[in-house]
């Protein structure tokens, strides 16, 4: 299915490894209406903020590439923190 290049597309996590690659590809495909928010602009663990954002922006497509990540040491040291934040992000 071809993508509508004028559609509003929200890319969560656009500054990360995966999200930035997605944004580059969407630009290459000619997409012109990308919605990009940093964590300081939109906290994806805050359900009411996310609901307000979606009500205001009404994106047609959502690409969720956002995640709390760390290296091996951070993941081993704080495993519950990472899973908790990522579950909150993906269920908001």
Image: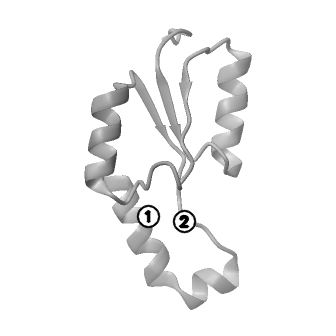
Q: Which mark is residue 65?
A: none
Q: Answer few, some or many: residues within 10 Å of disc 2's Cα (few below 14, many 20 plus, some between 14 and 19).
A: some
Residue 61 picture quarter: top left
Distance Cα–Cα, label 2 vs label 1: 6 Å
- Residue visible at 63% across and 83% down in the picture: 74
Horizontal side of residue 3 vs 29, given as left or right: left
Horizontal side of residue 84 vs 64, given as left or right: left
Quick one: SS at disc 1? helix
Residue holding disc 1: 86
The percent position of residue 51, horizontal first and vertical second, equals 27, 43
* Nearer-N-terminus badge (2/1): 2
The percent position of residue 33, horizontal first and vertical second, equals 55, 18
Q: Is residue 57 depicted above or below 84 in this figure?
A: above
Horizontal side of residue 45 vs 82, given as left or right: left
Quick one: SS at disc 2? loop
Residue holding disc 2: 68
Q: Is residue 53 depicted above or below 48 in this figure?
A: above
- Residue visible at 50% across and 48% down in the picture: 41
- Residue visible at 61% across and 15% down in the picture: 31
- Residue visible at 59% across and 87% down in the picture: 76
The percent position of residue 62, horizontal first and vertical second, equals 43, 33
The percent position of residue 38, horizontal first and vertical second, equals 57, 48
Of the pair 49 and 2, the residue shown nearer to us: 49
> Does the residue at mark 2 contact the one at mark 1 (Cβ under 8 Å)?
yes
Q: Is residue 9 depicted above or below 13 in this figure?
A: above
Q: Answer few, some or many: residues within 10 Å of disc 1's Cα (few below 14, many 20 plus, some between 14 and 19).
A: some
């Amino acid at each position: 299915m071809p993508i509508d290049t004028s559609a509003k597309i929200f890319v969560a996590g656009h500054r990360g490894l995966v999200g930035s690659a997605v944004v580059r590809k969407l630009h290459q495909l000619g997409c012109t209406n990308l919605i990009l928010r940093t964590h300081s602009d939109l906290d994806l663990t805050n359900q009411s903020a996310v609901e307000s954002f979606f009500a205001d922006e009404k994106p047609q497509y959502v690409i969720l590439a956002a995640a709390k990540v760390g290296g091996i040491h951070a993941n081993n040291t704080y495993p519950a923190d990472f899973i908790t934040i990522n579950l909150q992000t993906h269920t908001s």
